[in-house]
Image (cartoon, rainbow, N blue to C red):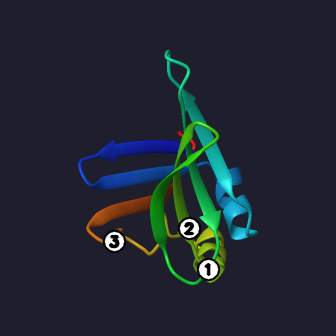
Amino acid sequence: MKLRMLGDSLRLRLTMSETQSIGEGQSVAETTSFPDGSVMAYVLSVAGEQVSAGMAMHQGQHQLLIKIPLSLAEHWSHSTDVGLGGDEPLYIDGLQILIEKDFDCV
């Protein structure tokens, strides 16, 4: 899963296997380690009935957690839609979130 940030927007790009995992109700996660020893994790999780996003600290690690409803994840993973929710980004209190399938280059 790739994470791209610019201002108040986040873009997550999932491989086909990660897209399948999300459609099956599983979480996907990545971590980035910094030279000072700190770690940032970013997690896309299937939970609840609404889209949500937030930051947390767990055992000295910063974690960005985005949650999406299972019904939305199931539909998207089996559809031909590139973006979750179609072409429109998801908005959470002014934060724009794009979740997309990352197709292999041919």
Q: Which residue appears at 58% of the width and 73% of the height?
A: 76
Q: Which residue is mark 1?
A: 48
- According to the picture, the residue beneath numbered tag 3 turns out to be 91
Tell me whether circle 2 and circle 1 mark residues in contact (CB < 8 Å): yes
Res 106 → quadrant = top right
Disc on the earlier residue, 3 or 2 = 2
For the residues labelled 3 and 1, the Cα–Cα distance comes to 16 Å
Pick the quarter of the image with the N terminus: top right
> Would you say 67 lies left or right of 74 here?
left
Sequence-earlier tag: 2 or 1: 1
Residue 40: image location, x then y, percent: 53, 37
Q: Residue at x 39, y 43 (%)?
A: 4
Residue 56 against residue 89 in the figure, above or below: above
Above or below — where is 59 with respect to 102?
above
Task: Report which residue position mark 2 lands on.
Answer: 67
Q: Residue at x 57, y 38 (%)?
A: 61
Disc 3 + disc 1, Cβ < 8 Å? no
The percent coordinates of residue 56 (x first, y second) are 52, 52
